[in-house]
């Protein structure tokens, strides 16, 4: 019986798995850097009020999914359930807007949401994403969408689809929501319980409902927000689609894609893959022109996306992990030999940039050779009785079985060739 286990919805990342994760992380961040994005890191917890004000009270995240507590000083804190509000907070606090008109930022980070765990849905999970802060232009939306698309293409994700919509500016939303409620009022009895609740509190979110009866009813009866947006906003949308067309990025205009968080305005998009099953969203994003002002900064336009790492890994067919086998294994059978090996290993790591393993289990020569074989090391350096007497080490090339004896003082030069 194991006494302590990971908490429900959390998981260990063991070294074998992490090798893949590191390869994936490297490729993702490399692509984002190619687009001119710089990494940003924010603390693991923030004031709860930041999320309440940023994400909105009538959202699942704020209503029921946040890990919040009151600390010893009486401050109400929350483990971050998303990254856009913390990055907007960092932007305001560090006055980034005064330093440059446009900031392209990316992250690869851990998030916490108390959701019902299932395949592709955890309570602690990883996201990568990007936020471009400072531009109103459709080119910026197109850059964000194409970068996300490019990342998934890089991993050959199958059955991928990009859905795109515009929910216009917040000014039209009040009028539109009245219209929506008026149209659906007569059908309240036909809608599921969840939709009924959402209709009262966060009506836009009804479109996220998975119930087919509700969806059929929306198709018949619900006015769509895209049909209410202004001429400028629809031009903004058209310009994005022109750039995506020019880049051969296939997308579907999905007028029901609204995304549930309060801070979204204008563009919303999602990339999904059928290979994922029920939790098919690889990433989601959009514009949030009002968030920065809402949390106390100057009005600043912004657009971004957030993507689940676990989902990406589920969708990836095959990927070769970056394997880094050790270069050298020092085989030692006495304390004296061990001390010499420790000193040599340090110099070789520093001067030759090699991965060097030392023996710390006190195994026999034969067992150490077996271990070196298992690790697939390139060279072993044996320091036995005879070697100690001669002040030399026996270097064996494990691929060719060639052996040479090299003095301890020349060893760094040997591995530097
Ligand atoms: P969101 O921040 O809710 O828009 O989510 C963005 C992306 O993060 C989703 O498309 C998923 O890929 C991923 N994601 C969201 N919630 C979870 C979760 N609980 N567990 C794993 N991945 C998640």
Image (cartoon, rainbow, N blue to C red):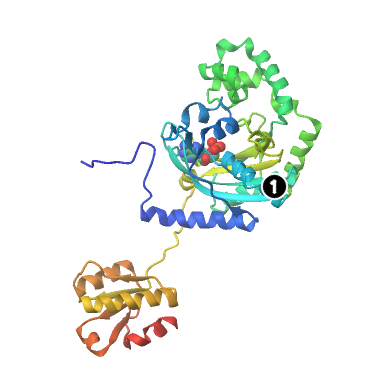
Judge by depth and name the residue closer to the eye, 106 or 306.
Answer: 106
Task: Work out whether 277 lies above or below 126.
Answer: above
Task: Work out whether 29 lies above or below 164.
Answer: below
Q: Quadrant of residue 335?
A: bottom left
Residue at image coords 48%, 57%: 23
Task: Work out whether 375 lies above or below 20.
Answer: below
Residue at image coords 44%, 81%: 416
Whole-percent x, y for residue 193 in the image: 51, 16
**Residue position for label 1:** 97
Residue at image coords 44%, 77%: 351
Residue pushed farthest right? 231
Q: Is residue 166 left or right of residue 312?
A: right
Residue at image coords 51%, 57%: 26
Judge by depth and name the residue closer to the eye, 371 or 264.
Answer: 264
Q: Quadrant of residue 400?
A: bottom left
- Can you tell me whether the CB of the residue at mark 1 lies under 8 Å from the nearest atom of ligand 1? no
Query: Is residue 344 visible in this depiction of the protein?
Result: yes
Query: Is residue 277 visible in this depiction of the protein?
Result: no
Q: Quadrant of residue 415?
A: bottom left
What element does badge 1 sit on? helix
């Amino acid at each position: 019986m194991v006494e302590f286990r990971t908490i429900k919805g959390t998981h260990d990342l063991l070294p074998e798995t992490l090798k893949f994760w590191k390869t994936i992380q490297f490729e993702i961040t490399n692509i984002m850097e190619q687009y001119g994005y710089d990494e940003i890191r924010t603390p693991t917890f923030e004031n709860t009020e930041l999320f309440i004000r940023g994400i909105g009270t009538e959202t699942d995240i704020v209503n029921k999914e946040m890990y919040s507590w009151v600390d010893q000083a009486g401050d109400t804190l929350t483990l971050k359930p998303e990254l856009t509000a913390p990055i907007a907070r960092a932007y305001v606090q560090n006055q980034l807007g005064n330093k440059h008109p446009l900031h392209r930022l990316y992250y690869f980070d851990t998030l916490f949401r108390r959701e019902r765990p299932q395949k592709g849905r955890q309570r602690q999970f990883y996201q990568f994403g990007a936020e471009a802060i400072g531009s109103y232009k459709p080119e910026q939306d197109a850059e964000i969408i194409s970068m996300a698309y490019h990342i998934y293409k890089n991993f050959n994700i199958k059955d991928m689809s990009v859905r795109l919509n515009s929910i216009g500016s917040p000014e039209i939303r009040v009028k539109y929501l009245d219209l929506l409620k008026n149209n659906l009022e007569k059908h309240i009895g036909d809608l599921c319980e969840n939709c009924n609740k959402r209709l009262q509190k966060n009506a836009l979110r009804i479109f996220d409902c998975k119930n087919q009866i509700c969806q059929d009813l929306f198709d018949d009866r619900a006015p769509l927000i895209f049909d209410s947006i202004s001429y400028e906003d629809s031009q903004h949308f058209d310009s994005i689609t022109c750039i995506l067309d020019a880049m051969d990025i296939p997308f579907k205009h999905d007028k029901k894609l609204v995304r549930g968080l309060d801070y979204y305005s204008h563009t919303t998009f999602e990339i999904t893959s059928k290979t994922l099953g029920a939790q098919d969203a690889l990433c989601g994003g959009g514009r949030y022109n009002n968030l920065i002002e809402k949390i106390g900064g100057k009005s600043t336009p912004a657009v971004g996306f957030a993507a689940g790492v676990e989902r990406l890994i589920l969708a990836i067919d095959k990927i070769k992990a970056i394997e880094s086998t050790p270069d050298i294994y020092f085989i030692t059978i006495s304390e004296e030999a061990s001390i010499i090996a420790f000193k040599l290993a340090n110099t070789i790591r520093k001067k030759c940039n090699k991965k060097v393993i030392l023996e710390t289990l006190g195994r026999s020569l034969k067992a150490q050779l077996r271990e070196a074989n298992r690790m697939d090391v390139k060279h072993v350096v044996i320091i036995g009785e005879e070697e100690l007497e001669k002040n030399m080490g026996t270097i064996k090339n494990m691929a060719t079985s060639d052996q040479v004896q090299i003095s301890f003082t020349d060893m760094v030069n040997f591995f530097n060739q």
